[in-house]
Image: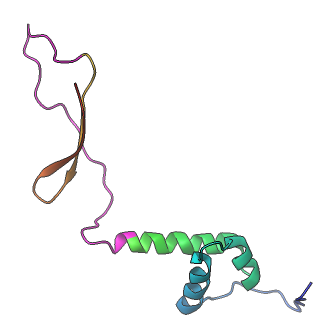
Amino acid sequence: MDRVEVITRVERRRKWTDAEKAAVLAETDTPGTNVAAVARKHGIARSVVYNWRSARRAQAIAAMPGAGPVEFIPIGVVGGIEEGQPAASSEPVLAVAQSTGDSLAPIADRGA
């Protein structure tokens, strides 16, 4: 055992500066590094480091160009089959589109 830590008082929540968090997170980003080992090395609970990573990921996503609030997309049936005409396929068709401003651009289409 290389290190012995003696705690003489009840320790309250520690305040970590953004620079300290960035340094720990940079260490966890190193290939082959284990998050638990980095947390142990710095005396931090693993869950705290994982929460910092999640927060960093959420900030990166929010900072992406065009990123807005996440919303549910309403769906509906477009067109229909006129009475008396056979359906083109017995399988349902799903077309997925992504909003690109004023229009919708198809990103996936599964059909007959």
Q: Quadrant of residue 92?
A: top left
Residue 90: x, y in percent? 25, 16
* Above or below for 103 versus 95: below
**Type of secondary structure dominating the magenta stretch:** loop
Considering the image in quadrants, where does the C terminus appear? top left
Q: Tell me the quarter of the image containing the N terminus.
A: bottom right
**Image: 57 above or below 103:** below
Let me know if residue 16 is in the magenta part: no
Q: On the image, which quarter does residue 50 sit in?
A: bottom right
Front residue (pair 6, 22): 22
Magenta range is 61-89
Task: Give the side of residue 102 with respect to residue 31, left or right.
Answer: left
Is residue 32 found left or right of 87 in the rendered image? right
The question of residue 86 being in magenta is answered with yes
Residue in the image at 11% along x and 23% along y: 80
Above or below: residue 44 compared with residue 71? below
Q: How many marks?
A: 0
- Seen from the viewer's position, the closer of residues 47 and 95 is 95
Question: Which residue occupies 18% across, 31% down?
Answer: 77
Q: Residue at coordinates 29% horizontally, 67% vertically from top-left?
A: 67
> In x, y percent, where is residue 72?
31, 49
**Image location of residue 75, percent across then percent down:** 23, 39
- Report the residue at 13% width, 10% height from top: 86
Q: Quadrant of residue 47?
A: bottom right
Taking the view exactly as shown, the residue that stands out farthest to the top is: 84
